[in-house]
Image (cartoon, rainbow, N blue to C red):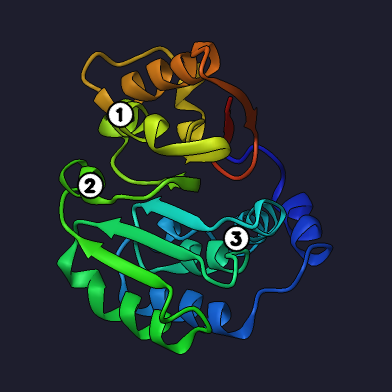
Amino acid sequence: MHFISEELENYVEQHSQHEPELLVKLFKETHQKILQPRMLSGHFQGRVLSMLSKIIHPKHILEIGTYTGYAALCLAEGLSKEGTLDTIDIKKELVTIQQKYFDLSPWKNQITAHLGDALEIIPTLNKRYDLVFIDADKENYINYFNMIVPMMSQGGIILSDNVLWSGKVLEKLNPKDTSTKILLEYNQIVNADPRVETVLLPIRDGLTVTRVL
């Protein structure tokens, strides 16, 4: 589902900050070599992530769901000078392209890529996070959220991607569609949880901005 017309999407991109050259190359290589390239954040959403990170100026960032590293590099643009970014993905076949572009970036010594199950890795990360981006398996969004909130600094921001799920959140639920079911529950939970305040933005496939109180 397209939430705005293609023409309007193009206008928005043309009147937003240009992609850094490194991200242009990563975008192109992802589309040439990797299955399901639409999972990439892309130009407009990437600039949104970059802007939010620059506003927050986080010391520690956590990303759940690295894919090819595009969003991680966008988020890294706002890192403080001594900041760190932990990013987690379970797909071994993506490690080479991730590390290639991390090493080419100015933040190569600040980014740590973890390979494995995020639910097992997150408890081992002994940090207080200022910014978290959730963009992995939808079935575990609620688990990630509940695990992450106690690890957040006060005023920290949790960004959750794909929360509109191509408009499926408005359709009659297929009982076998676990991802949509969990996302519907997740959207309700983050909006009602007294520990946070939330706004759901209709950016790309839906981006929730949740601030920890």
What amino acid is found at the position of numbered circle 1 in the picture?
Answer: Ser
Separation of residues labelled 1 and 3 (CA atoms): 24 Å
Residue at x 19%, y 56% (from the top left corner):
90
What amino acid is found at the position of numbered circle 2 in the picture?
Answer: Ala
- Report helix, strand or loop for mark 3: helix
Residue 200 vs 175, above or below: the answer is below
24 relative position to 145: left or right: right
Residue at the spot of label 2: 118
Q: Which one is earlier in the sequence, the residue at label 1 or at label 3?
A: 3
Tell me if mark 1 has few (under 14), some (14-19) or many (20+) residues whose alpha carbon lies within 10 angstroms of its own.
some
Q: Which one is earlier in the sequence, the residue at label 1 or at label 2?
A: 2
What amino acid is found at the position of numbered circle 3 in the picture?
Answer: Gly
**In the image, which is nearer the foreground, mark 1 or mark 3?**
3
Q: In which image quadrant can residue 113 be found? A: bottom left
Residue at the spot of label 3: 46
| CB contact under 8 Å: marks 1 and 2 | no
